[in-house]
Amino acid sequence: MTRLYEAMFLVDNGLVREDWKGLKGAVAAVLEKHGAQVQTARRWDERRLAYPISGRQRATYLLVHFLTDTQAIAPLRRDLELSEKVLRYLIKSADAVPD
């Protein structure tokens, strides 16, 4: 069953400064590898982290809405855990893509 999901990614600031479009494309490529259709991908803000993650004190937020099969979420999570570009992520189902 295909469902709409919302995902928030914390990505490494060093990589964002080097190549934002490339990093955004890399996150989208991981999603598309698992059959997801990206609806939106928006850069949020760069923020100081409450605690260091992989030695980083700051990170940039990336909000993505995508359509995918419910069975694709578990393998997608495994790939995101192994990604060096994504520090943390949160995936949840969504009702609609906001304006």
Image: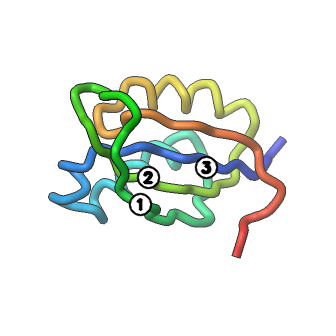
Residue indicated by mark 2? 61
Amino acid, disc 1 = Asp
Gap in angstroms between the C-alphas marked 1 and 2:
6 Å
- Left or right of residue 43: residue 58: left
Which mark's residue is nearer the viewer, 3 or 2? 2
Which mark's residue is nearer the viewer, 1 or 3? 1
Mark identifier at residue 78 = none
Q: For residue 71, what is the image quadrant?
A: top right
Between disc 1 and disc 2, whose residue precedes? 1
Quadrant of the snapshot with the N terminus: top right
Nearest to the observer: residue 65 or residue 33: 65
- Left or right of residue 48: residue 91: right
Point out residue 53 in the picture as x, y percentages from the top left corner. Answer: 32, 28
Tag 3 and tag 2, C-beta contact below 8 Å: no
Residue drawn at x 41%, y 60% is: 45
Q: As drawn, which residue projects farthest toward the bottom?
A: 99
Quadrant of the snapshot with the C terminus: bottom right
Residue drawn at x 76%, y 44% is: 93
Gap in angstroms between the C-alphas marked 3 and 2:
20 Å
Tag 1 and tag 2, C-beta contact below 8 Å: yes
Residue indicated by mark 1? 45
Residue indicated by mark 3? 36
Gap in angstroms between the C-alphas marked 1 and 3:
24 Å
Above or below — where is 87 with respect to 7? Answer: above
Circle 3: element type? loop
